[in-house]
Image (cartoon, rainbow, N blue to C red):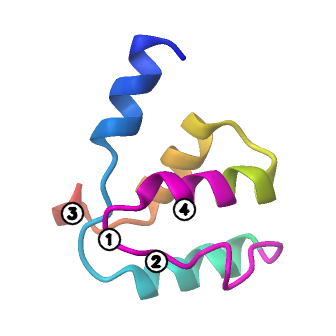
């Protein structure tokens, strides 16, 4: 793991109501399941890992996908 990736992982936090965003992700990526999108505060890494595996994408790509769906005030 390089330093840049480590910074991105540690700085990524989900703020606010996750339900609307998870619904949008499920619509955009039907292969995501409710279990894949289950989120508990402080466990962003687990959520990212599940989405990364299901979509077969790199962590950075998953973070960008999730951030696009987050309200601007939460970023």
The residue labelled by disc 1 is 41
Which residue does the image show at 54% across and 62% down from the upper left? Answer: 47
Q: Quadrant of residue 32?
A: bottom right
Q: Is residue 52 left or right of residue 6?
A: right
| Kind of element beneath mark 3 | helix
Which residue does the image show at 79% across and 59% down from the upper left? Answer: 54
Closer to the chain start, of discs 2 and 1, is 2
Q: Is residue 58 left or right of residue 18?
A: right
| Kind of element beneath mark 1 | loop
The residue labelled by disc 2 is 21
How far apart marks 2 and 3 lie (CA) works out to: 12 Å
Closer to the chain start, of discs 4 and 2, is 2
Closer to us: mark 3 or mark 1? 1
**Residue placed most toward the observer, 72 or 58:** 58
Q: Does residue 13 sit above or below 19 in this rendering?
A: above
Q: In the rendered structure, find residue 74 and report the number of the disc placed on it.
A: 3
**Quarter occupied by the N terminus:** top right
Q: Which residues are magenta?
A: 30-50
Closer to the chain start, of discs 3 and 1, is 1
| Kind of element beneath mark 4 | helix
Q: Does residue 22 sit above or below 61 in this rendering?
A: below
Percent of width and height locating residue 14:
32, 63
Closer to us: mark 3 or mark 4? 4
Closer to the chain start, of discs 4 and 1, is 1
How far apart marks 4 and 2 lie (CA) works out to: 13 Å
């Amino acid at each position: 793991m390089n330093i840049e990736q480590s910074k991105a992982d540690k700085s990524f936090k989900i703020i606010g109501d996750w339900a609307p965003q998870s619904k949008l992700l499920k619509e955009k990526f039907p292969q995501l399941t409710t279990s894949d999108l289950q989120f508990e505060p402080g466990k962003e890494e687990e959520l990212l890992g599940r989405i990364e595996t299901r979509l077969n994408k790199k962590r950075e790509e998953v973070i960008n996908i999730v951030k696009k769906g987050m309200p601007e005030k939460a970023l």
